[in-house]
Image (cartoon, rainbow, N blue to C red):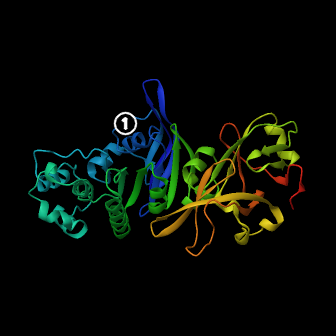
Amino acid sequence: MLEAQEVSVNFGRSPILREISFSLQPGETVALLGATGSGKSTLLRALMGLQSIRSGKILWKGVPADVADLARQGTLAWVPQQEGFYPQCTVEENLRLAQQFQSVSTRRIEPWREVVSRDIPDLLPLLRRRPEELSGGQQRLLALARALVKSPAFLLLDEPFSPLDPPLRYTMRERVGRLQKDRKIGLLHVTHDPLEAQMVADRMVFLDQGKVLQQGAPKSLREDPQHLEVARWMSRMSSLFFQLPPGDDRCSRELPEWSLSLRIAESYSTSTDGLPLDLIVPLEAWAPLRGIPDGAEQSGVSIWMKPMERRWVDSRLWRRWETPGGQSCWRIELEEDDHVAGESVACCLDWKRLLWFQPNGERLRCEVVAGWRDGRGAAN
């Protein structure tokens, strides 16, 4: 197992990584997700021994490790964003050099040609070409092959598919996934694409400004985000986002989008008294009345949403919906659904499924005990 324990990295006096902790098991895929500048690539460099750490430890099989030595042995292999090929050398020479530059190891290393023939046979007709003569997809295959010929136990991928067009990106994801499962390699996959992260990962680690905001199974980050930034990344297309200012009554928050008031239980309102709260309405919290979420009849109020245009994406039909205030979200629907674009539809909002966040972005476990329309009395 490869493990980081409270790893911190500084550039000069500026902290870049702050007490990062996570683990990676053999045969497991962990996705590092976060915005540009969140510290993802710096963490990979630290794991490869290319970036000194200010504090913390990196463990290999439970004991502190010299990760630079593990990288030299090929136990850890890295596919960086910039390939770093030897431009004057052919594909074959680049593969030979990748294997020859490993330090002496007790591990059995397969001949590079056997690795390529089995795992990436597409490169065999290209062995005499130079890297500049390869297409973008072929260059990514070469970068992957240079890592695989080292017979690594763990493979670190730094946004490996970002320069590729969508069909090739999908093909490469599928190929890497098969290789990883067949060879039981631990895979650390850096990406800024939440959809890609959910497709490839057994677990996800979300970084923001050098800190881990949340880690766990993709489903837990999507359905139970612990921080506002995680929620924005994991459901930005399918959720609605509101900021609710404090009102005269500290237990109530007004949602003018639908002329709604939501009353927070007294025990939760003290810590939020006088502070604005961020509210997210996830996809699971609302539906047209003929498709009410489970339990919504006990904890729901009726709202209006306006169906707009439909789009086919990855063989699924998506519909854009608008709130009365013009905010949009997308949800999948059946082709036979007969909503008329531009005509308002009565929907049920289940207030127990709403996600609340404090001004510092941390999740607030609010219990909403009542919801009503202004001037119309209790909704349910």
Image x and y of residue 171, in percent: 33, 65
Out of 339 and 317, give the one closest to the viewer.
Answer: 339
When the figure is inspected, residue 362 is found, relative to residue 332, above or below; the finding is: above
Would you say 252 lies left or right of 75 here?
right
When the figure is inspected, residue 84 is found, relative to residue 295, above or below; the finding is: above
Quadrant for residue 266, please give it: top right
- The residue beneath circle 1 is 51
Residue at the limit of the structure toward the left, as seen here: 128
Image x and y of residue 94, in percent: 15, 51
Quadrant for residue 166, please give it: bottom left
Would you say 149 lies left or right of 286 here?
left
Identified at 82% across, 48% down, the residue is 261
Identified at 32% across, 50% down, the residue is 163
Identified at 25% across, 57% down, the residue is 137
Out of 278 and 85, give the one closest to the viewer.
Answer: 278
- The amino acid type, in three-letter code, at marker 1 is Gln
Question: How many numbered marks are there?
Answer: 1
Q: Secondary structure at mark 1?
A: loop
For the N terminus, the quadrant is bottom left
For the C terminus, the quadrant is bottom right
Task: Please say whether residue 369 is visible from this viewpoint.
Answer: yes
Binning the other alpha carbons within 10 Å of mark 1 as few (below 14), some (14 to 19) or many (20 upward) gives some
Identified at 57% across, 62% down, the residue is 319
Out of 317 and 46, give the one closest to the viewer.
Answer: 317
Image x and y of residue 308, in percent: 59, 59
